[in-house]
Image (cartoon, rainbow, N blue to C red):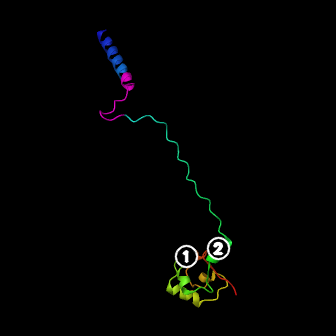
Amino acid sequence: MKTLLRAVALVTSLVVSSVVFAQSPQPAAPAGKAPPPMTAPAKPAKPAESKPVEPAKPADAKAALIDINTAAKADLQALTGIGDVRADAIIKGRPYKGKDELYQKNVIPRGIYDKIKDKIIAKQK
């Protein structure tokens, strides 16, 4: 009977200690360091406001375009990917019915044309 009482006491003490241990408070912060303050969860940042894109003015856009049929060599060289040799090739291939003839006639590669197509025009006389 004593053995049974000891066994019950041992099991009871183990159960009580495990419950007490599980519910014990967290250890205190080390000396000299204050625990972080309890704060509300951070709110998600608002998306950055973007400026509205202003539509291009037709008169300004046409004035800024370079006519590949009449442009000087220096004007052509100002375009991305157009150097001395390509500017000479563009001048030699004139006149052009459309700006896409630059790559159709293999005057410039398609990749270069894609970079400059919004900056050029082929006006007709």
x%, y% of residue 14? 34, 20
Q: Return the residue found at the far bottom.
A: 92
Tell me where the magenta segment starts and ends, as one range: 18-34
| Residue name at image x 46 percent, y 36 percent | 39
Give 61 or 16, whichever is nearer the viewer: 61
> Amino acid type of disc 2?
Asp
The residue labelled by disc 2 is 60
Q: Are marks 1 and 2 in contact (CB under 8 Å)?
A: no
Rendered position, 16 above or below 104: above
| Residue name at image x 65 percent, y 65 percent | 55
| Residue name at image x 32 percent, y 11 percent | 5
- Image check: 84 left or right of 16? right
Rendered position, 67 above or below 9: below
The numbered dot on residue 111 is: 1
Instruction: Give the position of the C terminus as an image quadrant.
Output: bottom right
x%, y% of residue 26? 37, 29
